[in-house]
Amino acid sequence: MRRLFALLAVAMMVVGLAGCGASQSGTQTGGITVRDPWVRAAMMNMAGDQSGAMGNMQQSTPMAGMGGGHSHGSEYGNTAVSAAYMVLVNNGAADAIVKAESDVAKSVELHNVIMENNVMQMRQVEAIEVPANGQVELKPGGLHVMLIGLNRDLKEGDEVVIKLTTRSGKTIEVKAPVRKP
Amino acid sequence: MQRWLLRFFAILAALALSGCGAYEFRGTMLEPPNPAPELPLTDQFGNQFQLSNYRGKIVLLFFGFTHCPDICPTALGDLKRVMEKLGSDAAKVQVVFVSVDPERDTPELMQRYLAAFNPTFLGLNGDRALLEKAYKDYGVTVIRRDLPNSGLGYTIDHSGYIYAIDQAGNWRLLWAHGTPVDDIVSDVQALLRNPPRS
């Protein structure tokens, strides 16, 4: 009976450890962990066009009724964008997310939205600060990880891997499910 | 017992009366309602748009851009849910998205972007002078900001209101960004119940 108990305890420990490993792949104990990540579903601009021929395409499909003012259009292309949201929980000393990477987009940036008199202003930020033993929520209408220039459609049920780098030099791998916009 | 019943009915009657007498809109009412300025723009399918073609319907208007990953999809997602909750009444409502980023909001991009929410949503773009008049007419702030270190190149600061134009073509209501979907649905249903005399 006692033996069975011990076995059970060991089994539970193994399960517990395995659980830990799986859910926080790449994270260190202490410091920032990620909870409830998700990415907004988004479509790429054009099916089958991944060759960077955006400039040509824009010229071949001029905007109906548009009178000039095209100078910046081709410069930035018709890139599709999306955003990732999550809760950053910090069990250690003050730290920050300083970089985000993902293979689903050409560039991945940290952004914030400020609302002033109901005017939304989106700005790039250098870092997302996470206070010691505190948490920061990345959510619609506020801080988010912006995915610019999607390589593929992000459909509901897909999973997007995002690698976050902290100021303290740790990397956190986040597996974020795609949800409807 | 009878007294209790009587009181109950009195309360019910009072509730009913207050309900039909004066529905209190959750959005901001525009008093007096004025004719909504025309939007002589082109939709994402290349068709000429005219507000005056939508008499008899309620038009819900939002100004935004497709490279906006956060606020605009949130507002459009809310409007998608409004349409779902309206059920068969959704046929009496047209959602219209006006571009604040005419250079990047090409018809193709608008088609894909809006179809992800609801294929009946219209996305308008057009001549810059006409767009700028529309922003001014509706009091929409549109400011282009360069983001020098961003892959985005630039972003557009813009107002986040949703506007309601009634069946007679009058601009009646506006809702601030983040207004609960149920509040918008309730206001739209109130407009549908009491169509303006025109």
Image (cartoon, coloured by chain):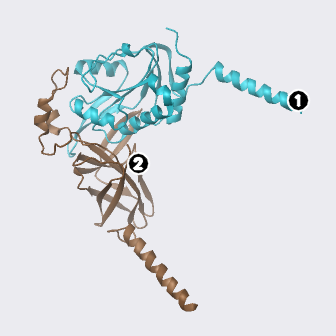
Q: Is residue A166 visible?
A: no
User: Within 10 angstroms of label 1, few (less than 14), some, or many (20 or more) residues?
Assistant: few
Which chain comes out cyan in the rendered image? B
Q: Nearer the viewer, residue A131 or B197?
A: B197
- Are the residues under badges 2 and 1 in a single subunit? no
Horizontal and vertical percent position of residue A6: 52, 88
Q: What whole-number distance in Å separates the C-alpha atoms at marks 2 and 1?
A: 54 Å
Name which quarter of the figure residue B26 lies in. top right
What color was chain A assigned in the picture?
A: brown
Q: Is residue B136 above or below residue B105?
A: above
* Element at label 1: helix
- Labelled disc at residue A139: 2
Horizontal and vertical percent position of residue A51: 12, 45
- Badge nearest the viewer, 2 or 1: 1
* Element at label 2: loop
- Labelled disc at residue B3: 1
Q: Is residue B83 left or right of residue B146?
A: right
